[in-house]
Image (cartoon, helix red, strand yellow):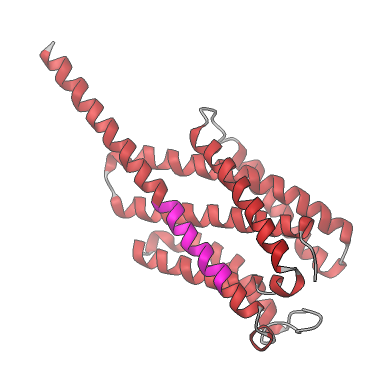
């Protein structure tokens, strides 16, 4: 009986340690994501409210991108693919630095919204997105339902959105843009819950190994995924709900 009680106490202490580690891990994921968001919107505001700086990337009247603007527009997509492919060869510190650089480049690509939309509508949509994101992420963290099967369908949906968005750059169809925005909100809402559960499960699966460097990098990758979900939901909702200047 004494041995059983001892084993149960050890198991309970280990479980409590993993739970505490999970909470710290999730706090770090959300904290890293929040800093990235602050960098993005800080850069976007600084450039978007300066005609001189914005003019480096876009026509200040029509907002049409120049060559540098096109590069900045597609740079975050290429950087995210490169980050996912190369993170295993980076240190955790290098991965975090890359994430913040990525967030700054994303800010450059979004700077035009401060000319195209009113400041009030940007703030309003940001608040709506924050509330929706928090609710979806909380559900993904607490639900007992296994939603891992959503991943392949959601990723296919993202690929479809990217292809449709690129094609519509040349078509300029308002109907296609509306459909992409509506579907995008739904897809990135699902990804928010999916990615949150995946971050949690990944930590629980690997916490017993005690590889802190690996878990730190996994946390940064999780921060990037949640960050992208937020940014994309925000942009889709802004297209649907934002008041244009």
Q: Is residue 111 magenta?
A: no
For residue 204, which quarter of the picture? Answer: top left
Q: Quadrant of residue 90?
A: bottom left
The residue positioned 55% from the left and 63% from the top of the image is: 80
* Residue 2 pos. (x, y %): 11, 14
83 versus 18 height, above or below: below
Vertical placement of residue 92 versus 218, above or below: below
Q: Is residue 221 visible?
A: yes
Q: Quadrant of residue 137?
A: top right
Q: Which residues are magenta?
A: 28-42
x%, y% of residue 233?
66, 53
Seen from the viewer's position, the closer of residues 169 and 40 is 40
- Apparent side of residue 160 relative to residue 144 in the rendered image (left or right): right
**What's the residue at 73%, 59% (across, down)?**
238
Taking depth in this image into account, of 186 and 37 the one nearest to the observer is 37
Residue at (16% x, 17% y) in the render: 5
Question: Could you say where residue 35 lies in the image, as x and y percent from the top left?
Answer: 47, 63
- Report the residue that reaches farthest toward the front: 120
The residue lying toward the viewer, choosing from 162 and 85, is 162
Q: Please say whether residue 218 is visible from this viewpoint.
A: no
User: Is residue 29 on the magenta stretch?
Assistant: yes
Q: Residue furthest left?
A: 2
- Residue 71 location in percent, x, y? 65, 78
């Amino acid at each position: 009986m004494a041995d059983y009680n001892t084993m149960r106490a050890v198991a309970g202490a280990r479980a409590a340690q993993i739970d505490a580690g999970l909470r710290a891990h999730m706090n770090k994921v959300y904290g890293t994501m929040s800093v990235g968001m602050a960098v993005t919107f800080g850069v976007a505001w600084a450039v978007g409210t300066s005609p001189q700086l914005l003019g480096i990337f876009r026509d200040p009247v029509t907002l049409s991108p120049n060559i540098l603007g096109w590069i900045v527009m597609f740079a975050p997509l290429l950087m995210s693919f490169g980050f996912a492919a190369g993170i295993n060869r980076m240190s955790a510190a290098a991965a975090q630095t890359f994430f913040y650089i990525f967030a700054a480049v994303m800010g450059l690509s979004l700077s035009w919204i401060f000319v195209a939309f009113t400041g009030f509508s940007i703030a309003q949509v940001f608040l709506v997105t924050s509330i929706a994101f928090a609710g979806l992420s909380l559900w993904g963290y607490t639900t007992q339902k296994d939603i891992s099967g959503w991943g392949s369908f959601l990723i296919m949906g993202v690929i479809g959105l990217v292809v449709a968005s690129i094609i519509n750059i040349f078509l300029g169809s308002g109907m296609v843009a509306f459909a992409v925005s509506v579907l995008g909100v739904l897809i990135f809402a699902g990804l928010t819950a999916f990615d949150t559960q995946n971050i949690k499960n990944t930590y629980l699966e690997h916490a017993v190994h005690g590889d802190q460097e690996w878990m730190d990098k996994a946390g940064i990758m999780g921060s990037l995924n949640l960050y992208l979900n937020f940014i994309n939901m925000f942009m889709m909702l802004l297209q649907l709900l934002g008041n244009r200047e």
